[in-house]
Image: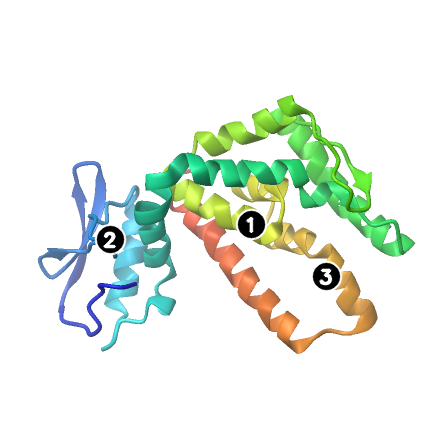
Amino acid sequence: MTGWTAKRFWKDVRTEAVEGGYTVRLDTRPIRSPAKRPLLLPTPAMAEAVAAEWAAVAEVVDPGAMPVTRSANAAIDKVAPQFDEVAGLIAAYGGSDLLCYRAAGPEALAAAQEEGWDPLLDWAARSYGAPLVTTVGVVPVAQPPESLARLAAPIRAASAFELTALHDLVSLTGSLVLGLAATSGAFEPETIWRLSRIDEDWQAAHWGEDEDAADAAARKCRDFLHARYFWEISAPRP
C-alpha cells in the first residue's frame, strides 16, 4: 500500500460513473491505486464496497481493514499487466488438482475423499466436458490435454478483476475444479471450502488440532470467502 495517505483528509466519499466503469472520490479527488493508476472499477457494487471501506476510516488508513480496495488494487496494478502469466498459473492447477490425489488409507479418509470429491469431478466433467483422472498417492498422473484446455477456457475469458478472485479461490483450495465450482453459483462457498479441507479436518479430528494451524486455516477461510465475494461483485451476475 505504498503511496497511500496515512491519515484521513476527506470529509465526503462518493461513487461516480465514468467512461469505462466507476470510480470513488474522496471529496473531489478520485482514488488511485498504489501504482498511481486510476481506480477504475467494473461494477456499481464494487464501487460502493470500496466507498464503504473509505468512509469507515476514522483517522488512520488501515489497508488490512479494506479487503475490497486491496483486491481492486491487485487487479489493476498486478493482474492486468501480466494477465497471461497469472491465467497460466491458475490453469496449471488443473494438472495437479487436489481432487485427483487420493489417500491409500486410512479407509475412512479415503471414503471421505471419495464422497466429497467425486461429485465435484463429475460436475466438472458435465459442465466443461473435462473429465479428470484420479490416482492413489502423490505420484503425478497425466491429465487429458483436452480436459485441461476446457478448464482453462473460462480462466482466459475472465476479466482482470475476476482473475484476481479466481487466483485466490484456486490457490487457497489447491484445486482448479473447486475454484471454478466456487464461481459457478451451483455450490455454497462454505461447502467448497469444507471440501478443500477434508485431509486437514480428518487429521485434526484424529490427532488433535494445532492452535497455530487452526488460526492459519481461519485466516485462509476468510480470504477464500472474500475472494468469492470479490468475484460476485466483479461483473453483473444473473
x 56%, y 49%: residue:
171
> Which quadrant would residue 29 be assigned to in this image?
bottom left
Structural distance between the alpha carbons of marks 2 and 1: 25 Å
Q: Nearer the viewer, mark 2 or mark 1?
A: 2
Question: Taking 54 as reference, is 176 left or right?
Answer: right
Residue 32, position as x, y percentages in the image? 20, 54
x 73%, y 62%: residue:
201
Q: Compared to 140, does 5 lie above or below?
A: below
- The label shown at residue 35 is 2
- Give amino acid for label 3: Glu
Q: Residues within 10 Å of mark 2 (few under 14, many from 20)?
A: some
Inspect this view and state whether residue 236 appears: no
- Give amino acid for label 1: Ser
Q: How is the image coloured?
A: rainbow
Structural distance between the alpha carbons of marks 1 and 3: 16 Å
Question: Taking 205 as reference, is 152 left or right?
Answer: left
First in sequence: mark 1 or mark 3?
A: 1
Q: Residues within 10 Å of mark 3 (few under 14, many from 20)?
A: some
x 23%, y 45%: residue:
40
Q: Which residue has dot 3 on it?
A: 200
- Give amino acid for label 2: Ala
Residue 143, position as x, y percentages in the image? 70, 30
Residue 2, position as x, y percentages in the image? 27, 64
First in sequence: mark 2 or mark 1?
A: 2
Residue 122, position as x, y percentages in the image? 72, 33
Secondary structure under tag 3 reads helix
Q: Which residue has dot 1 on it?
A: 171
x 38%, y 60%: residue:
67
Q: Nearer the viewer, mark 3 or mark 2?
A: 2
Secondary structure under tag 1 reads helix
Front residue (pair 219, 23): 219
Q: Which quadrant does the C terminus fall into?
A: top left
